[in-house]
Image (spheres, grey):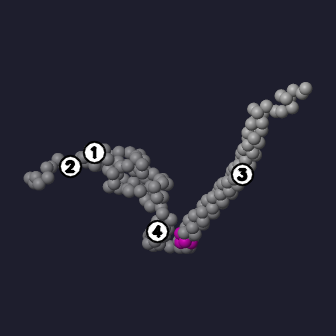
Amino acid sequence: MENKETAVESPEVQNDIPEVERLKGEVEFLKAELEASKNKFLRLYADFENYKKRMLHELEAAQRSGRFDAVRALLGTLDDLERALGFASVKPEDLIPGVRSVLENFARNLKSLGVEPVPGAGAEFDPRYHEAIGAVEGEEGKVVHVYQQGFKYGDLLVRPARVVVGNGAKPEGAEDQKPGAESS
């Protein structure tokens, strides 16, 4: 007589076969999903690398354009200075109006490029825009004299103004008078 147990699989093994098939299906599904995610990631990575290259190219083009505009704006001043040299045989005092005109034109060109002077004489001393190179009698904390004009480009400081600042001392000979008091 045969052993029935060996010829027929146990009920537990028969129940596990569908579960194994289901798990195999899940594994295949997860593999496909992983492959799709990997491909999506690679496309996004390639797009981002292309974006970085494009932005770098656009930045370089903007910088070139900015330099071009600056050079074009300053060429007029170069022309004016060359013309002024043509008048070298003229008396120096006769050159002053022409040189003043060149200076005004140059200042206009700088302004058109967004470059502006920092506040000068009479302004409050501001260490963000001024470099104090001395102190003299005068109103404390005020710029008394500008040795070298400073410039800013938008919020960026191109060059600080080199200034002399008042130290709060009154000039000799100046008397302390109260407002409204008359001197006799």
Which of the two discs, 2 and 1, sits closer to the camera? Answer: 1
Q: Is residue 100 above or below residue 144?
A: below
Tell me the quarter of the image containing the N terminus: top right
Name the residue that disc number 2 marks. 174
- What is the C-alpha distance between the residues marked 4 and 2? 41 Å
Could you tell me residue 144's position as x and y percent? 34, 52
Q: Residue furthest left?
A: 184
Q: Nearer the N terminus, badge 2 or badge 1? A: 1
Mark 2 Cα within 10 Å, few/some/many (few <14, many 20+)?
Answer: few
Could you tell me residue 66's position as x and y percent? 57, 64
Name the residue that disc number 1 marks. 168
Name the residue that disc number 3 marks. 36
Q: Nearer the N terminus, badge 3 or badge 2? A: 3
Which of the two discs, 4 and 2, sits closer to the camera? Answer: 4
Q: Where does the magenta region start and end? A: 76-80
Residue 155 visible here: yes
Q: Is residue 108 above or below residue 152?
A: below
Disc 1 on helix, strand or loop? loop
Q: Which amino acid type is shown beneath numbered disc 3?
A: Ala
Instruction: Between residue 131 and residue 135, name the one nearer to us.
Output: 131
Q: Which amino acid type is shown beneath numbered disc 1?
A: Gly
Q: Nearer the N terminus, badge 3 or badge 1? A: 3
Disc 2 on helix, strand or loop? loop
- What is the C-alpha distance between the residues marked 2 and 1? 13 Å
Instruction: Between residue 47 and residue 145, name the one nearer to us.
Output: 47
**Residue at the (83%, 28%) spot, across then down:** 5
Q: Report whether 138 appears left or right of 99.
A: left
Do tag 3 and tag 1 residues touch (Cβ < 8 Å)? no
Name the residue that disc number 4 marks. 108
